[in-house]
Image (spheres, rainbow, N blue to C red):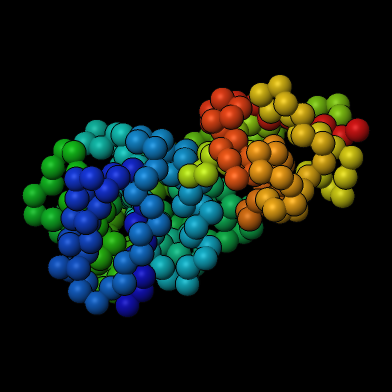
């Protein structure tokens, strides 16, 4: 059986994420389940979309990714499933799959989307507040059991998409923004490492602080130093060595970050 991954904003306090697994295993007892995270900031669809986009490529083809960051649960927002490139995705139609879809379109990869409107593949009783349990988990389990995607609902061609923040070109560089802040307080930006194009004499400016040149690793500088480097996803990251850069600088997601070439 394929793997099912889980990404939610449920946290670990009340057992909600565990219930998802119970529903899946009742339908597909042999499936492997991997927790990507249940610590997405509550209702932060953009954060969830980026975390999913970053993680999904590292799983085998055929993996089913179930993502539930769903502030519109119980409303008219559609439950959907998708086959994007060589992976499957299940979750709400609220933009959660935007980065994955944009990448697939850019690379010419297939993307098939289905409105999950076949209740025979859901739990018998569906609440207005827990579609992760009542719709998405059973659908993911049925996919893992071999049910064809197309049998789960009706094709759609108009998925909801997020407006992803993009860098803006300026005279001597680029203006971007804080995209994510990780567990360590490291600050991920939307400034791709590709924008540097071999330039070494550069300044990354954030919260009024200028960081001259990039370092290669955290260990190149002393504890407490503010550094900029290329992270594991090829984006410019700002960090404090052995510290918390976001707390030190007082920045939040959406704050500006500038990249200037000297």
Q: Is residue 210 above or below residue 70?
A: above
Residue located farthest toward the left when viewing the structure as drawn: 125
Image quadrant containing the C terminus:
top right
155 sits to left or right of 216: left
Image quadrant containing the N terminus:
bottom left
Rendering coords of residue 83 (x, y %): 43, 61
Rendering coords of residue 148 (x, y %): 32, 69
Rendering coords of residue 105 (x, y %): 59, 52
109 sits to left or right of 131: right
Residue drawn at (60%, 35%), measured in percent from left and top?
245
In which quadrant of the rendered view does residue 247 lie? top right
Nearer to the camera, 182 or 29: 182
135 sits to left or right of 219: left
Nearer to the camera, 115 or 197: 197
Residue drawn at (48%, 49%), measured in percent from left and top?
51
Residue drawn at (65%, 35%), measured in percent from left and top?
166
Rendering coords of residue 246 (x, y %): 56, 33
Residue 151 seen: no
243 sits to left or right of 154: right
């Amino acid at each position: 059986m394929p793997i099912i991954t889980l990404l939610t904003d449920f946290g670990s306090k009340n057992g909600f994420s565990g219930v998802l697994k119970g529903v899946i295993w009742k339908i597909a007892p042999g499936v492997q389940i991997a927790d990507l995270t249940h610590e997405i900031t509550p209702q932060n669809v953009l954060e969830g979309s980026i975390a999913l986009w970053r993680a999904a490529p590292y799983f085998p083809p055929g993996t089913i990714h179930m993502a539930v960051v769903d502030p519109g649960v119980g409303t008219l927002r559609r439950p959907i499933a998708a086959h994007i490139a060589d992976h499957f995705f299940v979750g709400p139609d609220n933009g959660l799959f935007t980065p994955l879809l944009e990448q697939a379109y850019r690379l010419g990869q297939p993307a098939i989307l289905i409105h999950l409107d076949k209740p025979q593949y859901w739990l018998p009783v569906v609440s207005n507040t827990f579609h992760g349990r009542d719709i998405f988990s059973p659908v993911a389990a049925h996919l893992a059991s071999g049910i064809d995607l197309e049998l789960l609902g009706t094709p759609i061609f108009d998925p909801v998409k997020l407006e992803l923040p993009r860098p803006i070109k300026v005279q001597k560089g680029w203006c971007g923004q804080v995209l994510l802040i990780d567990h360590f307080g490291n600050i991920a930006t939307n400034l791709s490492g590709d924008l540097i194009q071999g330039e070494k004499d550069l300044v990354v400016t954030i919260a009024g602080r200028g960081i001259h040149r990039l370092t290669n690793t955290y260990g190149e500088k002393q504890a407490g130093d503010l550094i900029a480097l290329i992270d594991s996803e090829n984006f410019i990251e700002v960090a404090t060595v052995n510290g918390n850069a976001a707390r030190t600088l007082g920045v939040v997601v959406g704050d500006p970050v500038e990249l200037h070439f000297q």
